[in-house]
Amino acid sequence: MNNDRTLIIVPTYNERENVPGLVAQILGVAPDADVLLLDDDSPDGTAQLAAELFAGEPRFRVLRRKGLQRGYGRSIIDGYRSALEGGYARVVQMDADFSHDPASIPALIEASRAADVAIGSRYCEGGGIRNWPLRRRLLSRFANRYVSAITGLRVSDATTGFRCYARRAIRHLLEGRIVAEGYAFLVEATYRAQKEGLRIIEVPITFTDRREGQSKISRAVIFESVLMPWRLRFARRRGGDDNTHLLSPTGDEVTPD
């Protein structure tokens, strides 16, 4: 396998309405990438439908996850392992609901050539949000400031699920002990990448509210997200200072304050 190929991982649960169009778009905009659907045994038949529609596409496959070890974070970890085992140079992760525009994938891949982690950011210069009410915008902004204030993260959008990790970053994350199971995984992964001294860049994206289906965020997921920054902060106090190398959206390195 060409060692510059990309694996695009998409965790799914009841995304039957979105997956056919999304996978087709991803395959079209990223000709040097393969797509892995990480389906948590969706009752609506998401995995079966996708497997049937793209049965003749060698760049697409489905990983059906069953049993107790399910959830967003665990799905992503399985995707990372598949990327390393498959010899891929990088992983792009994105949501299945069209909130992340496949057209932004090439920019993330290109940015990952100069950094270990390329974050698709709603809040860096040039980023934005569509179709969200003011309440959700304010809540999202507050969540990122809350995370940064507690953990010391120096990225503007630590809660975005649209990002690209170079192989070195994937290996570091898998070697560490990531404990988050829900969307708090995103904050924890960003924090651990920063702690390892990996180079992080933010790439502006426009986030759009989901087209079809329902949000998967539960009270348990929200509770974990509230607690995670504090767990990371106290772990940092026990483990010493971070060694960080951050990049601006233009790719210039930024020295932490």
Image: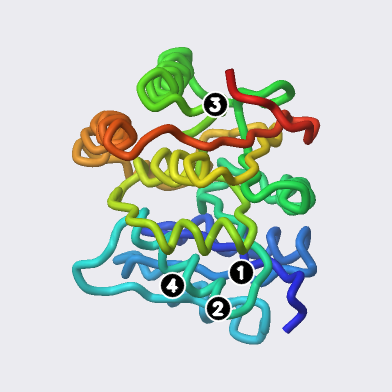
Q: What residue is shown with label 4? A: 47
Q: In which quarter of the image is the N terminus?
A: bottom right
Three-letter code for the amino acid on which mark 1 is drawn = Val
User: Which element is circle 4 on?
Assistant: helix
Quadrant in which residue 155 is drawn = top right
Q: In front: mark 2 or mark 4? A: 2
User: Which element is circle 3 on?
Assistant: loop
Q: How many labels does the image show?
A: 4
Q: How crowded is mark 2: few (under 14 residues within 10 Å), some or many (20 or more)?
A: some
Task: Say which of 72 and 91 sits in front.
Answer: 91
- Give how far apart the Cα atoms at labels 4 and 3 are: 37 Å
State the mark number for residue 61. 2
Residue at (37% x, 59% y) in the render: 13
Quadrant in which residue 16 is drawn = bottom left
Query: Residue 215: image x %, image y %?
Result: 37, 41
Three-letter code for the amino acid on which mark 3 is drawn = Arg
Residue at (59% x, 46% y) in the render: 198
Mark before the other along the chain sequence, 1 or 3: 1
State the mark number for residue 35. 1
Q: Are marks 1 and 3 in contact (CB under 8 Å)?
A: no
User: Which element is circle 1 on?
Assistant: strand
Task: Say which of 119 and 68 sits in front.
Answer: 119
- Give how far apart the Cα atoms at labels 1 and 4 are: 13 Å
Three-letter code for the amino acid on which mark 4 is drawn = Ala
Q: What residue is shown with label 3? A: 154
Q: Are marks 1 and 2 in contact (CB under 8 Å)?
A: yes
Tell me if 94 is positioned left or right of 118 in this view. left
